[in-house]
Amino acid sequence: MKTIVALLILPVIMLLNTSFNSAINHFVLPVSAERPLSDSLTLPKQLADEKYFGPVLDISPPTIVGNFGEPRRLHFHTGLDFRTNQEEGHKVFAAADGYISRINVNGAGYGNALYITHPNGYVTVYGHLQRFNEEIMQRLRKEQYSKENFAVDFYLQPNEIPVNKGDMIALSGNTGGSGGPHLHFEIRDSLERIYNPMMFGYKLKDDMKPVVSLLKFYPLDDLKYKSDGYRTKVLLKSGIYEVSGSVLKLNSSQVGVSINAWDVINLSDAHIGIYNITVFDGDRMIYEYQMDRIAFSDKRNVLSHTDYPIFANESHRTFHKCFVEPGNHCPVYCNLANSGVIDLSDGKAHDIHMEVSDFSGNVSLVKFKLEQDKSSTLFKAGDLKYTTRFDYDHENEFSNSDIKIKIPEGCLFDNVFFNYSSALSTDPTVFSRVHAVDNSNTQVFDWFSLSIKTENLNSALTDKAIVIYKDGTGATTSRGGKFENGFVTCKAREFGTYYVRIDTTAPQIKPLNVIAGKNMRTYKKLLFKITDNLSGITDFDTYLDDKWVVTDYDAKSATLFHVLSDSISTGEHTFKVVVVDERSNRADYSIKFVM
Ligand SMILES: [Zn+2]
């Protein structure tokens, strides 16, 4: 099998050799090292030609503010974020010949997004667009009017909107869950797996090495659940990052390490993600991480890959863990020995070195010595207090008269010493006890079932009852839920504080630029703010003189934008907005204006 595989990839390597330079070594790794990425061999030959995909933006040279795989809140980033100089309206081009295969428009997420399917089977994705070209806009509006919905996500036939490489397909924007104007660009295969676009020639000038700031060590023997680990700075000495002192003495025989590092590139001041990390114990490689490709189902492994409590509590400071928890199946690890755990039980000093690399092959070296010393106090141990133990390789359940928790196998990254407590609430808007379901520093990969017994809930209001999640910062989110036999049951995927509230309040609709009777001819747009207090907005509709009309929605600013058509007649018109929340509370608002 391996021989066949090697023969198949050979022509690809030869073609790649000229254009991919240093990246070639990374690219070959999947075969030689039996990496989980073995099916990256299915990359068609023409992709080895970096000219297959062309520029996607009218800014030259392009630069990025985010790269593929960099850890973000609750996910690994799945594309390149091209800089658009803090402005919208840059021309976006088709990366190669193909056809518009999907149009996805939403007030959150990717915002206005286009998908192009190319003859080689790959799909390029363009997100957060301001608007599409006229032909695509017309196709979008047709779909929106036929569904009477702003948010649409639909597939097109190859003959509907074919495109040529370099065609202007859209203008860049800031729609959906975007933190500022930029172009989000992805390359996927037909199985919806997402690739590092740099593998396809989207390389940028980069002769700068990654920056390393901190290391953190974790005891992984019997101290594992009792200690918070030990964090230390590294200092750059003669081009190598080192830990001060000759040998770091640790009171544990099994040790994991994580590294706080980021990459920098020539044409951007952004801190971007690391492409490759290796760890050597002596001459032996014990860990490698490489960001070539992930699937959507892999994205939440970022909760295990990073030291996520630090990420959440310290403005997204990223420590990459260089040991792999048993429930983390993200296909970005290879060359693992003992899951990357450093075994110090021989009592000797171990020479550890790490290489932190970017896609262009700039490498930063980190070197230090570790030794087990039982008298060391670097790992401070507390008491282990817990209610019950959950094993990561089982289904787990916990219940009492007030709560039922059912966690399917595959939800936990490692065994959890689970803590539970509950308290009466003094808040009259809370209709259950307040439950501490472990705490938000324990990460959960996937959905589990949570049922909370209601208290003092009026039987007429049971369909308005929802489960509220409160995280470590005090921020709350509705998890919805369904009332049955005295309990509200929802799906949850965080540990932390939970309780029941009711949502009987309709959303709010506020006009931003319209006043009753006002002449709106010069305004071109009608703007409204729509908000909900608890369960969240699930649908809205807008009507001009009682006929449904499309209105754009931006969730992050909670704003509706209705563009007034040039063909609208002079005289008085009525505009109506209807907004519904997740608990079916409905708000109606009508206003008359003049044109
Ligand atoms: Zn992005």
Image (cartoon, grey):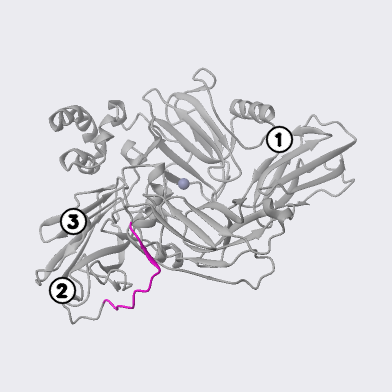
**Residue pictured at 40% horizontal, 61% vertical:** 308
Q: Please, what is the three-letter code of the amino acid marked with disc 1?
A: Val
Q: Is mark 3 on a helix, strand or loop?
A: helix
Whether residue 316 is visible, yes or no, is yes
| Residue 209 counted in the magenta span | no
Disc 2 crowd rating (10 Å Cα; few below 14, some 14-19, many 20+) is many
The x, y position of residue 234, in whole percent, is 27, 70
The x, y position of residue 454, in whole percent, is 62, 60
**Majority secondary structure of the magenta segment?**
loop
297 on left or right of 149: left
Whether residue 521 is visible, yes or no, is no
CB under 8 Å between callouts 3 and 1? no
Name the quarter where the C terminus is drawn.
Answer: top right
Image mark for residue 550: 1
The x, y position of residue 432, in whole percent, is 61, 64
Distance between the Cα atoms at labels 3 and 1? Answer: 57 Å
